[in-house]
Amino acid sequence: MLTATYDLRYLQAGLEQLESYLLSKDIYRPIGIQAARGETPYPQLTLGWLLLTRQRLQALAQLSTERTELERLLQQLDTLRTRWRTAWGTKAQLEFRARLNLWRDFLEEYRADPAANSDRYSYEVNRRLLLELLAAEAGQLPDAEQAALLGLDEWLRAILVPGAFIWEPQLSASFPTPTYWYLYGTLSDHL
């Protein structure tokens, strides 16, 4: 189960190297911290994961100390985003392209063998969510990439079995249904 402490550690570690990351050619970079025993290992540093962490923390940070720390870190994130706006947008575009390819690959694997891939959806849908967050930061995406995502979304809408929010219930407030509709359902093990 995710906690505010877990996400705050990721955000803090990411911010410590964000400037050098933005100015590098890296899309993925080791975050440099270890998760506590029993916790999910931290993902690599990417702009998308920083954005997702920020959004999850809006729901997870409940205690006043967590809220204070979150506000401080978000101010730092916004300052770096403003200072390095061009690099930020370029990084968002590069990651968007990489995530789009991974998301397309998963949906094609599912189409080829639903029974073997339907149970991967709750993890793989992270890629679709990251695409949403990155698109808002990337400026003007190429028409072909926008069209590809629209096509994948049309197909996903046709096969998604509507249902409850797929992650921890306390996160649902940060991911409302109209925008994040793909987080409210599952894939069948057959087409």
Image (cartoon, grey):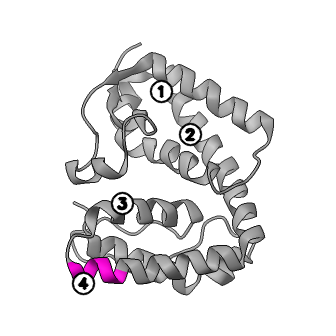
Where is residue 15 shown, x and y percent of the image? 53, 81
Task: Say what amino acid the circle numbered 4 marks.
Answer: Thr
Residue at x 78%, y 34% (from the top left corner):
144
Name the N-terminal-most of marks 2 and 1. 2
Label of residue 99 in the image? none
Name the residue tied to disc 2. 103
Name the N-terminal-most of marks 4 and 2. 4
Task: Say what amino acid the circle numbered 3 marks.
Answer: Arg
Name the residue tied to disc 1. 110
Name the residue tied to disc 3. 56
Structural distance between the alpha carbons of marks 3 and 2: 21 Å
Horizontally, is 146 left or right of 57 in the view? right
Task: Say what amino acid the circle numbered 1 marks.
Answer: Tyr
Q: Closer to the observer: label 2 or label 1?
A: 2
Structural distance between the alpha carbons of marks 4 and 3: 16 Å
Instruction: Examine the rendered structure and indicate whether residue 83 appears above or below residue 120.
Output: below
Horizontally, is 140 left or right of 166 in the view? right
Asked if the residues shown at circle 3 and circle 2 are in contact, with their CB atoms under 8 angstroms apart, the answer is no
Task: Say what amino acid the circle numbered 2 marks.
Answer: Trp
Give the class, few, some or many, for how many residues have Cα within 10 Å of label 4's Cα (few <14, many ≥20): few
Asked if the residues shown at circle 2 and circle 1 are in contact, with their CB atoms under 8 angstroms apart, the answer is no
Q: Nearer the viewer, residue 176 or 11?
A: 176
Residue 66 falls inside the magenta stretch = yes
Give the class, few, some or many, for how many residues have Cα within 10 Å of label 2's Cα (few <14, many ≥20): many
Q: Magenta residues?
A: 64-69
